Image (cartoon, rainbow, N blue to C red):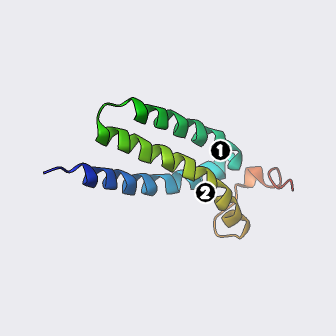
Amino acid sequence: MDFSGILIGAISFISIGLFHPIVIKAEYHFSKRCWPVFFVAGVLLMVLSTQLGNITASACAAVVGMSCWWSILELYEQEKRVEKGWFPANPRRAGKDNKK
């Protein structure tokens, strides 16, 4: 039996579950301007995925890398959710990031 698919699915599920609160906390503490961190992490993980000899490990690295890139979009969406009052705004940043 080959459990690679189940492992990749589990990593996908865990990645989505972990990145949701990471995005919320990142936007709260650093605003959406921290997106380059997610971009670089995604690039590094994608490069790593091309270098790994094990297909399952390669797929898992790629899944987490894509989750990093998806988190960039979610940072911008999180900012909108904060503006709507669905999540608390960081009081120490109030007004600083509202340049439009």
Q: Is residue 25 left or right of residue 11?
A: right
| Residue under numbered circle 2 | 74
How far across and how far down the image is residue 52, in percent?
35, 31
Q: Is residue 1 left or right of residue 28?
A: left
What's the mark number on residue 35? 1
For the question of whether residue 31 can be seen, the reply is no
Answer with mark 2 or mark 1, whichever residue precedes in sequence: 1
The residue located at (65%, 39%) in the rendering is: 36
Residue sticking out furthest to the right: 100
What type is the residue that disc 1 sits on?
Trp
How far across and how far down the image is residue 34, in percent?
66, 43
How far across and how far down the image is residue 29, in percent?
65, 47
Question: Residue 73 or 79: which is nearer the viewer?
Answer: 73
The residue located at (53%, 50%) in the rendering is: 22
The residue located at (82%, 50%) in the rendering is: 96
How far across and how far down the image is residue 31, in percent?
69, 49
Q: Is residue 79 above or below residue 31?
A: below
* Disc 1 crowd, CA 10 A, few/some/many (<14, 14-19, 20+): many
Q: Is residue 47 above or below residue 80?
A: above
* Disc 2 crowd, CA 10 A, few/some/many (<14, 14-19, 20+): some
Label 1 residue SS:
helix
Label 2 residue SS:
helix
Q: State how many labels appear.
A: 2
Q: Quadrant of the C terminus?
A: bottom right
Q: Is residue 86 left or right of residue 21?
A: right
For the question of whether residue 55 can be seen, the reply is yes
What type is the residue that disc 2 sits on?
Glu
Q: In 3D space, how far apart are the residues under numbered discs 2 and 1 (Cα atoms)?
A: 10 Å
Q: Quadrant of residue 91?
A: bottom right
